[in-house]
């Protein structure tokens, strides 16, 4: 539910990083926070457990700058990935305008990626939103693990499992090293803004 | 769903916040939507709260409490309020998709604040209903 403030000439939109537990959603936001320190004046908000797992959400406000004369403020959120936190995960999706699905490239997490994507579809439906209509970008994370000899899913397998129907823009990435974190974020911001423009017309 | 508010409506909302709440001694007021977007905010200039983080947390907190209410068989809990030593925070729902958050000190009683918030909420409802808000 993006908000256009005609008085301040400002647009606020909500982008959510979704995906299975321990997939790297929080690491994505941490990388963005670190990379754009000069433009993000506030601290990243995290609600996590004692074991450092996301309990409710992480939140990072990000000033994109001016688009067509409007100041664009993007609110970046992550959801808790663990299966048991489905109720809180659903709450974070309220009013979402765009999604980055962070899949885990490790071969052992194949099933968890598929289940998480189905869970996203189901939770979006509770807000009467379709996974096929909302702006979405796929991010295949943890590509850096290949160097350590950890078996990873191939791009073809990930695309077949997660993106054969959605056909969303996809990025092989590493949130830890920063590889393709910013391009994936830029892509979802531009898709979200394009979608908002169409809606406002 | 995207919605927009124009200069006239936002001025009218700020006027209500100023007259009904700010002038009675509230320290900080903000109107947000349930997605956590900030629609309007006023503060006394003495405190520098991070409004965007507060809005995200307030929206999440309100949503979590509403879900708890449903689990125990209530439509919603009518009072959501946190008391601090110096500052307290009060949440009030406005229509389906908006929240009015008020931060106030010891100078105002909760009862009086609730009365003023209820009055302001009615006025804001009318303004929002007349706009293209969801």
Image: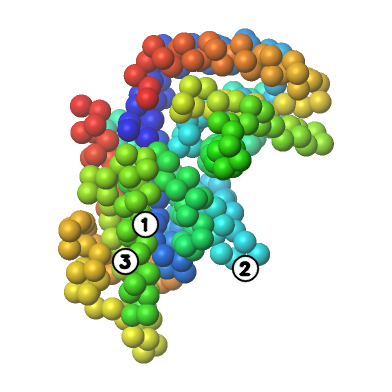
Residue B2 to residue B71: above or below = above
Residue occupying image coordinates x 38% and y 22%: B133
The image position of residue B46, as x and y in percent, is 70, 28
Secondary structure under tag 2 reads loop
Mark with earlier residue (1, 3): 3
Q: Residues within 10 Å of mark 1 (few under 14, many from 20)?
A: some
| Closer to viewer: mark 2 or mark 3 | 3
Residue occupying image coordinates x 43% and y 71%: A176
Are labels 2 and 3 on one chain?
yes
Mark with earlier residue (2, 3): 2
Residue A119 is marked as 1
Residue A114 is marked as 3
Residue A51 is marked as 2
Tell me the CA gap for discs 1 and 2.
Answer: 24 Å
Left-right relation of A5 to A45: left
Q: Quadrant of residue B119?
A: top right
Secondary structure under tag 1 reads helix
Q: Residues within 10 Å of mark 2 (few under 14, many from 20)?
A: few
Tell me the CA gap for discs 2 and 3.
Answer: 25 Å
Q: Residues within 10 Å of mark 3 (few under 14, many from 20)?
A: some
Q: Label 3 lies in what chain?
A: A
| Closer to viewer: mark 1 or mark 2 | 1
The image position of residue A84, as x and y in percent, is 51, 60
Are labels 1 and 2 on one chain?
yes
In terms of depth relative to the viewer, which is nearer, A45 or A91? A91
Residue A18 is marked as none
Residue B62 to residue A93: above or below = above
């Amino acid at each position: 539910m993006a908000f256009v403030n005609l008085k301040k000439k400002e647009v606020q939109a909500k982008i959510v990083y979704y995906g299975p537990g321990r997939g790297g959603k929080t690491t994505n936001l941490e990388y963005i926070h670190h990379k754009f320190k000069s433009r993000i004046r506030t601290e990243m908000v995290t609600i996590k457990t004692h074991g450092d797992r996301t309990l409710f959400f992480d939140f990072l406000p990000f000033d994109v700058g001016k688009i067509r004369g409007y100041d664009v403020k993007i609110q970046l959120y992550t959801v808790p990935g663990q299966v048991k936190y489905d109720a809180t995960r659903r709450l974070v999706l309220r009013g979402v305008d765009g999604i980055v699905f962070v899949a885990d490239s490790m071969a052992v997490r194949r099933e968890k990626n598929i289940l998480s994507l189905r869970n996203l579809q189901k939770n979006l439906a509770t807000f009467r939103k379709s996974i096929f209509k909302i702006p979405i970008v796929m991010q295949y994370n943890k590509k850096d693990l290949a160097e350590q000899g950890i078996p990873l899913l191939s791009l073809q397998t990930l695309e077949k499992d997660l993106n054969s129907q959605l056909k969303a823009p996809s990025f092989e990435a590493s949130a830890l090293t920063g590889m393709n974190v910013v391009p994936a974020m830029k892509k979802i911001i531009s898709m979200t803004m394009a979608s908002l423009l169409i809606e406002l017309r | 769903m995207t919605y927009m508010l124009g200069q006239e409506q936002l001025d009218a909302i700020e006027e209500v916040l100023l007259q009904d709440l700010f002038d009675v001694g509230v320290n900080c007021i903000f109107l947000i939507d349930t997605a956590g977007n900030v629609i309007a905010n006023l503060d006394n200039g003495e405190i520098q709260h991070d409004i965007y983080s507060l809005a995200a947390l307030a929206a999440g907190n309100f949503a979590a409490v509403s879900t708890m209410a449903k689990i125990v068989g209530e439509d919603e809990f009518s009072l959501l309020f946190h008391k601090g030593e110096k500052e307290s925070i009060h949440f009030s729902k406005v229509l389906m998709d908006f929240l009015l958050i008020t931060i106030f000190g010891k100078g105002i009683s909760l009862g009086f604040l609730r009365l003023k918030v209820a009055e302001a909420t009615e006025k804001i409802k009318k303004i929002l209903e007349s706009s293209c808000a969801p």
